[in-house]
């Protein structure tokens, strides 16, 4: 059998054949009577030499594979993919915005850490921050969603716009406080508040559902409470060889193919981007809100400036961009261009769970585990996925002591009363938070 570089590829000589060839050469030189048994001196010498020669064949195979995308691995695949401009996506860390409350004027140096209550995943702030005074709640005042106020030595954020009551204002720690026609959400203790960008302390797809970060790991005098108002942008592990091969092929096709695929691949390589969908309108009329001869790029994750730059570099001249977000990109000639794209619209999902439990097996924190299981499954959702009650209920049986899920109501508003599936559009993303899940567990016989 021919070995080495052949017409059909590289054929390495196996160790057994290398050893047999060396033994044959030794018999030819020293006679057929030479003792080549494994325990003999010559036998052991032949084995040592065969092992070293076999390593050379393995190295030659690796060198050959470095030029074959389907066989190359590791650094060899990196070098091969780089030839056509595809670089392995590095591991990234999940990012989130932390909302800290406490004493006005408290300084939070960069590197302050807070963790997710259930998984203990830690996030640390990226820049120095100072707690600033939240405006004092006002009677009979109009408020819009996102407004923050302080009242009763606590900070609240407007969840539903309206006009406040004539007196009192929010005072509890509830997630839905009615005040006139305004609905408030408790943020934390104190009169000061600040938002601080944070990053997970480890790389990979660390999940932090909205309102799940609640433990201060590096206390600072005057810092009382921490939370996250939105789901963390999930990081990723180092791209695998298999995924790099697939993306390399897609890049090659995009370069010589349609613009839609090229735009998608360009934006998908932006750090922290986890999902990209590109819609195009090739007609002379507005279709699905997209103007004529324009593209809409819907992006989940990533820094907006990086997303804008990637879209501008990929979209052909003369093609308009469309979306609910925009920014300016300056080209190499110093000319500023406004680029548009969209973020998926968040659809908060609320649950009302009722279950039967075996009191002897159900954990002390069983209700909290139920909430965590729902949020963990919800964190896997992608844009446009519908939310089905049965799919979430099934996850709860993995918790010790759960005998039956008698009710799994869900809805887009607090206190849902049905198990009707929540249907999302191609531009909507269902979001989940433990604060939006109520659990009622009752004892029952197994």
Image (tube, rainbow, N blue to C red):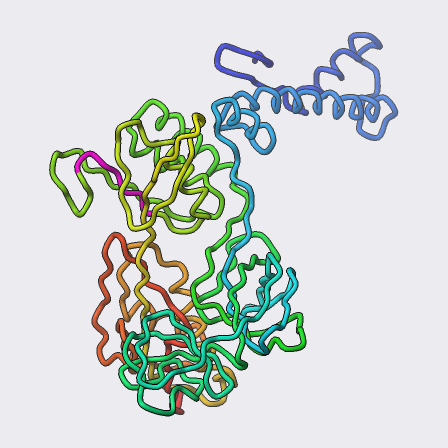
Where residue 383 appears, x then y in whole percent? 31, 54
Where residue 244 appears, x then y in whole percent? 48, 35
For the question of whether residue 117 can be seen, the reply is no
Q: Start and end of the magenta stretch?
A: 292-298
Determine if the magenta segment contains residue 294: yes
**What is the chief secondary structure element of the magenta stretch?**
strand
Query: Residue at image x 54%, y 75%?
Result: 192
Q: In terms of depth relative to the viewer, which is nearer, 132 or 237?
A: 132
Residue 368 placement, left or right of 287: right
Q: In terms of depth relative to the viewer, which is nearer, 78 or 165?
A: 165
Query: Residue at image x 82%, y 24%?
Result: 43
Q: Residue furthest left?
A: 285
Indicate whether 337 appears above or below 410.
above
Q: Quadrant of residue 337?
A: top left
Q: Residue furthest right?
A: 41
For the question of whether residue 251 can be seen, the reply is yes
């Amino acid at each position: 059998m021919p070995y080495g570089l052949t017409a059909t590829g590289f054929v390495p000589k196996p160790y057994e054949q290398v050893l047999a060839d060396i033994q044959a050469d030794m018999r030819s030189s020293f006679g057929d009577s030479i003792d080549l048994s494994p325990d003999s001196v010559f036998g052991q010498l032949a084995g040592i030499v065969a092992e070293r020669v076999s390593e050379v064949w393995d190295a030659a195979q690796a060198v050959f594979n470095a030029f074959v995308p389907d066989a190359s691995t590791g650094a060899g695949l990196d070098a091969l993919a780089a030839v056509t401009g595809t670089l392995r996506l590095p591991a990234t860390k999940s990012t989130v915005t932390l909302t800290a409350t406490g004493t006005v004027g408290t300084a939070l140096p960069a590197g302050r850490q807070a963790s997710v209550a259930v998984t203990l995943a830690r996030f640390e702030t990226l820049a120095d921050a100072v707690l600033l005074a939240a405006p004092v709640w006002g009677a009979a005042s109009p408020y819009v969603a996102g407004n923050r106020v302080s009242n009763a030595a606590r900070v609240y954020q407007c969840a539903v716009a309206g006009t406040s009551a004539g007196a009192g204002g929010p005072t509890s720690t509830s997630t839905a406080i009615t005040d006139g026609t305004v609905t408030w959400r408790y943020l934390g203790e104190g009169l000061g508040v600040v938002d601080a960008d944070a990053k997970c302390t480890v790389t990979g797809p660390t999940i932090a559902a909205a309102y799940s970060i609640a433990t201060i790991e590096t206390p600072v005098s005057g810092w009382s409470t921490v939370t996250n108002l939105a789901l963390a942008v999930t990081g990723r592990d180092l791209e695998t060889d298999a995924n790099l091969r697939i993306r390399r092929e897609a890049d090659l096709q995009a370069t010589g193919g349609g613009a839609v695929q090229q735009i998608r691949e360009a934006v998908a390589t932006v750090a922290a981007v986890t999902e990209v969908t590109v819609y195009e309108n090739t007609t002379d009329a507005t279709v699905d809100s997209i103007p004529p001869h324009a593209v809409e790029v819907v992006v989940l994750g990533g820094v907006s400036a990086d997303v804008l730059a990637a879209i501008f570099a990929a979209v052909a001249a003369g093609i308009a961009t469309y979306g609910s977000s925009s920014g300016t990109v300056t080209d190499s000639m110093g000319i500023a261009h406004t680029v548009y794209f969209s973020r998926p619209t968040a659809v908060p999902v609320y649950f009302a769970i009722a279950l039967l439990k075996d009191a002897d097996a159900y954990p002390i924190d069983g209700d909290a585990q139920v909430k965590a299981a729902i949020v963990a499954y919800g964190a896997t959702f992608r844009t446009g996925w519908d939310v089905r009650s049965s799919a979430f209920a099934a996850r709860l049986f993995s918790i010790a002591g759960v005998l039956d899920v008698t009710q799994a109501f869900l809805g887009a508003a607090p206190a849902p009363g049905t198990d009707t599936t929540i249907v999302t559009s191609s531009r909507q993303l269902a979001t989940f938070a433990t604060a939006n899940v109520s659990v009622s567990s009752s004892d029952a016989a197994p």
